Amino acid sequence: MERHAELGEPSMKNRRKCSPQLNDNSCQIMVDNSENVLNILRNLYVERQMCDVSLLVGNREHHAHRLILCAFSDVFQAMLMKPEWCEWHESKVELQELLPECEKVFHLFLEYFYTGKILITHTNVMPILALADKYIVKGLSRLCVQYMCKHVPHAASHNQLFLWLQYSIPCGHVEVAEKCQNYIKWNLESIANTPDFSNIDAEMLVRLLQENDVIVYNEMVLYNCVVRWLDLQKIRLRNCDTPFGELEEQVRYLVKNVMVYIRFPMMTPRELADLLLSPLIQQHKEFFVDRMTIGMTYHSGQRDQIEKISSTQEGKLLFTPRLYTSDIYSAVLVIENFNSLPSYHTSTFVFSSHMSAADCESDKINDWVVDLYPKGVWFKKCYLIVWQGTLEVPEEIISTVRLSLTCRKLFEAKIKVKVAVLIYGIQGGVEHVMEVKEKIHHFTNEDKVMNIDNLIPFAELNPSASNHAHESPYLIGPNRNQLKLNVVITSLHS
């Protein structure tokens, strides 16, 4: 009786939410008593009142209500309501979960059915998502996916990243897989220094090494990352008590199938010479000498040989630069005290970049001017004198984050380049490359300027005056008041 009275009468808090809606015939009051109703449902679960089914998961028994289970889960609805399932008439149902982690969080998963609330962390989100997927609880699956998309850097710093990636690909969580893959590509140097790096399998590493938008300081750094991965695989094989002969064979297989995608022509002649003394090269000399010879062919400008090697897609990749952050190809742009900048502020940066990785073309250097408009673009009213007379051009304001790149001097009449802008930010307290914007452009004497608009979502970088509490993920530094970009320019000239 006491419980029915509680259900029938809203609390003082809920009374204040009531909003009278008047019409000619009556006075109606919308009563919001949902909080108390949810508490009653939760108490049914916590106090095990009127339970009509128990779920045995691992060594733990969970008491529940068929009605609630069937209302939330398509799988439970089929299992407990359809006669063709052997469980439909059973009062005790044993559930087999593949992962021990799923057994540990099953009580949280079940309580969500009664409360609509669940505490998600970077360590439990995977087993909760696995349960939500298995029992087709779509709303909870959606919440887990949203959480994972926002916390990829946190997963990386806690050695969960590759676990998330390996689960999301076969299960069709495309958005999570893409976020994880991009984070790995764009922050590979930091990832390679974590214990989690050993969990990437050979197939996944090969796919990564085939990508052009991998961000590393240079190709030698990427080579060293792969060497570290090979060392970690060797340790793993030893820990599995793999016989010595079999271990050596597996390592040899991994070296050849992974190192074939390292772009040795993108290393300098000095780096190639130094590599000859490394233990790994000495152990697999025949394989590596052939690859390094291709690199020296490129640096000496043997065009016939280069064209022959480039006739295949795999060969062409060897001569394609990645997104290298060394100052030969790129420049870091930093704007301090961002929040105090006036509207339509312009920051200007000048730098040079090499247009070829080949040693024989080391004199091909271009000078660039970057104008960055992080607070929008303002075109003042002006007048144009044309043959018909004077034409007034009205004022225009564009709410966009624009980067304007000007080529100061062309070493050829026309050059084709790929411009990549690496955008840094903070998520989960971790600074990393959040986004990469790429654009291919032909620079000529008549067209020396290239613009990239909407480089960063304007509202995300520039909160409105009414939202001072907003903290943009694109601002970094101790006081979250610094905008950091890296412009990488690579030649696509044949």
Image: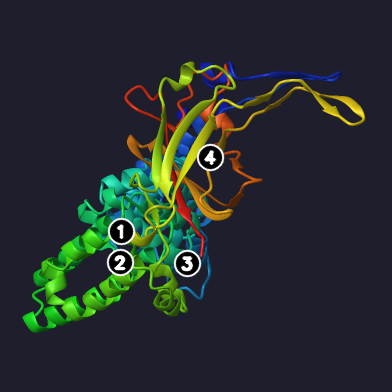
Distance of label 1 from label 3 (alpha carbons): 55 Å
- Depicted 316 relative to depicted 226: above or below: below
- As measured in the structure, the alpha-carbon distance from the residue carrying label 4 to the one carrying label 1 is 28 Å
Give left or right: position of 392 versus 99. right
Residue 92, can we see it?
no
Which residue bears the numbered disc 4?
A: 408
Q: Name the residue that disc number 2 marks.
A: 264
Q: Counting residues from the N terminus, which is met first, the one under dot 2 or under dot 4?
A: 2
Counting from the top left corner in percent of width and height, residue 81 is at 52, 65
Q: Assess disc 3: are there few (<14), some (14-19) or many (≥20) residues with their C-alpha within 10 Å of its C-alpha.
A: some
Q: What is the CA distance from the residue labelled 3 to the residue labelled 2?
A: 58 Å
For disc 3, the marked residue is 79
Which is nearer the eye, 194 or 331?
A: 331
Q: Are marks 1 and 2 in contact (CB under 8 Å)?
A: yes
Classed neighbour count for the residue bearing mark 4: other residues with Cα under 10 Å, few (<14), some (14–19), many (≥20): some
- Residue 219 is marked as 1
Q: Which mark is residue 128?
A: none
Give the mark nearer the N terminus: 1 vs 2: 1
Q: Nearer the viewer, mark 3 or mark 4?
A: 4
Q: How is the image coloured?
A: rainbow
Q: Earlier in the sequence, mark 4 or mark 1?
A: 1
What kind of residue is marked 3? Met
